[in-house]
Image: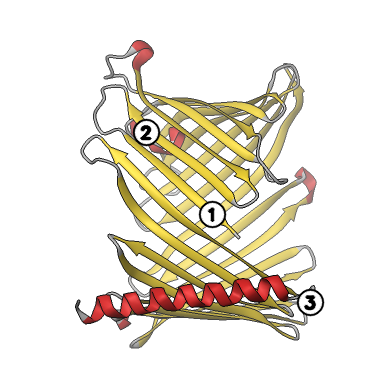
């Protein structure tokens, strides 16, 4: 047995001892500020080209005491312990702290260390994240400042590389209400060390055009994106009918600017999406792409121009709520009925106080590339 596997085996044994000790603590502790929990899970997958395969095994344990928590996460793949992560978080007065270190015991290599601090001073919120990883050139420090002054909210985020110390990127944003039209506006400017100015983005949310036209409320959201390469205006027209089960229908569009600011290169209505609530949380959703290049933005999958899905809750144990989701994706090149090209389905439920189960499936109608995934979780 090589050094990496010996270390992995030793740590696995250590985790078993820690778990046993923490379980004993959990059984004997009477302090309401004390809490212990965690889970053990395994993921199993089968595909057209591979038999039943264990894709991963995970272990998690969390101990909380007086507002502080410590956790251990271990991930196994191919019978090797390849990720071990220790984390802690808590507060010192008004200052929130967290830190986590991860390494690969099988190869005895460092993966990452992340620490964070956040607090509020006067009307400003500060947060800082230090992330150290290998290679060192990917390590960084990220500082975020935000605050509200009057009716405006300001945000500033900067990221610096630390090996070597160098500026990477920064984003400044402001949100403010447009009271005359009862809507809100948001603007962001981004710069980076690569090209200086990166982008200017301006958005407007839910401007009501008609409160009642043809039995529907008509509202408009607009996103303007300006970069050195292109200028794009993306309007979204939202229809809210009071005479249909569907309470949310959106028409998606795009206006591409020409060489000059005032010129227009193309106007495109590229999709329609909507959701209809049937009963007791069960809803049907649909998406139809009108331009092949926009399939991914509309249906979520670049190869399919249309999607119809249904989702809702499932009965579950112990106060938790399970869920199910199923969807069909359509492809004009499919030979199946109605051009159905792909069926995806999933569900998750907790069937006992300490046992949860989930399932995911992707089944193309041509039978090529199907995949089934099961996840079993034991909770304590």
Residue 286 % position (x, y): 52, 25
Look at the numbered discs 3 and 2 and tell me whether their residues touch, using CB distance below 8 Å: no
Q: CA distance from mark 2 to mark 1?
A: 25 Å
Q: In percent of the image, x 74 and y 69: which residue is there?
A: 148
Image position of 257 with respect to 153: above or below: above
Q: Residue furthest top?
A: 337
Q: How is the image coloured?
A: secondary structure
Residue labelled with disc 3: 31
Residue 71 showing in the rendered view = no
Of label 2 and label 1, which has the lower sequence position?
2
Judged by depth in the image, the label closer to the viewer, 2 or 1, is 1
For residue 259, side relative to residue 60 (left or right)? left
- Quick one: SS at disc 3? loop
Residue 344 % position (x, y): 42, 31
Q: Quadrant of residue 95?
A: bottom right
Residue labelled with disc 1: 378
Residue labelled with disc 2: 362
Look at the numbered discs 1 and 3 and tell me whether their residues touch, using CB distance below 8 Å: no
In the foreground, 338 or 268: 338
Count neighbours of disc 3 (C-alpha within 10 A) and say few if under 14, some if 14 to 19, many if 20 or more: few
């Amino acid at each position: 047995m090589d050094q990496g596997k010996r270390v992995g085996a030793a740590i696995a044994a250590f985790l078993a001892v820690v778990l046993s000790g923490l379980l004993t603590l959990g059984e004997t502790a009477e302090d309401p500020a004390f809490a212990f929990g965690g889970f053990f899970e395994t993921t199993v997958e089968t595909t057209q080209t591979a038999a039943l395969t264990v894709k991963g095994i995970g272990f998690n344990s969390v101990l909380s005491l007086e507002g502080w928590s410590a956790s251990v996460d271990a991930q196994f793949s191919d019978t090797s312990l390849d990720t071990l992560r220790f984390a802690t978080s808590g507060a010192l007065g008004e200052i929130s702290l967290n830190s986590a270190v991860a390494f690969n015991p099988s190869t005895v290599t460092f993966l990452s260390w992340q620490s964070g601090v956040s607090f509020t001073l006067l009307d400003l919120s500060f947060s800082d994240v230090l992330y150290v990883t290998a290679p060192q050139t990917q390590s960084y420090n990220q500082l975020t400042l935000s605050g509200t002054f009057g009716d405006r909210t300001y945000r500033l985020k900067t990221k610096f590389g630390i090996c070597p110390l160098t500026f990477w990127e920064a984003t400044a944003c402001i949100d403010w209400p447009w009271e005359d039209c009862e809507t809100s506006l948001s603007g962001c400017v981004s710069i980076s060390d690569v090209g200086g100015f990166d982008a200017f983005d301006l958005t407007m949310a839910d401007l009501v055009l008609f409160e009642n036209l043809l039995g529907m409320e008509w509202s408009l959201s607009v996103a303007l994106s300006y970069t050195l390469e292109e200028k794009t205006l993306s309007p979204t027209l939202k229809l809210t009918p009071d005479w249909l089960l569907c309470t949310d229908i959106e028409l998606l569009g795009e206006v591409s600017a020409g060489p000059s600011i005032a010129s227009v290169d193309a106007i495109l209505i590229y999709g329609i999406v909507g959701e209809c609530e049937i009963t007791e949380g069960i809803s049907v959703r649909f998406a139809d792409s009108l331009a092949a290049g926009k399939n991914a933005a509309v249906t979520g999958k670049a190869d399919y121009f249309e999607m119809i899905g249904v989702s809702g809750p499932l009965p579950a144990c112990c106060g938790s709520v399970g869920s199910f989701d199923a969807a069909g994706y359509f492809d004009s090149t499919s030979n199946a009925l109605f051009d159905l090209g792909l069926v995806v389905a999933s569900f998750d439920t907790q069937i006992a106080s300490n046992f949860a189960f989930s399932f995911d499936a992707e089944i193309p109608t041509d039978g090529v590339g199907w995949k089934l995934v099961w996840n079993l979780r034991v909770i304590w």
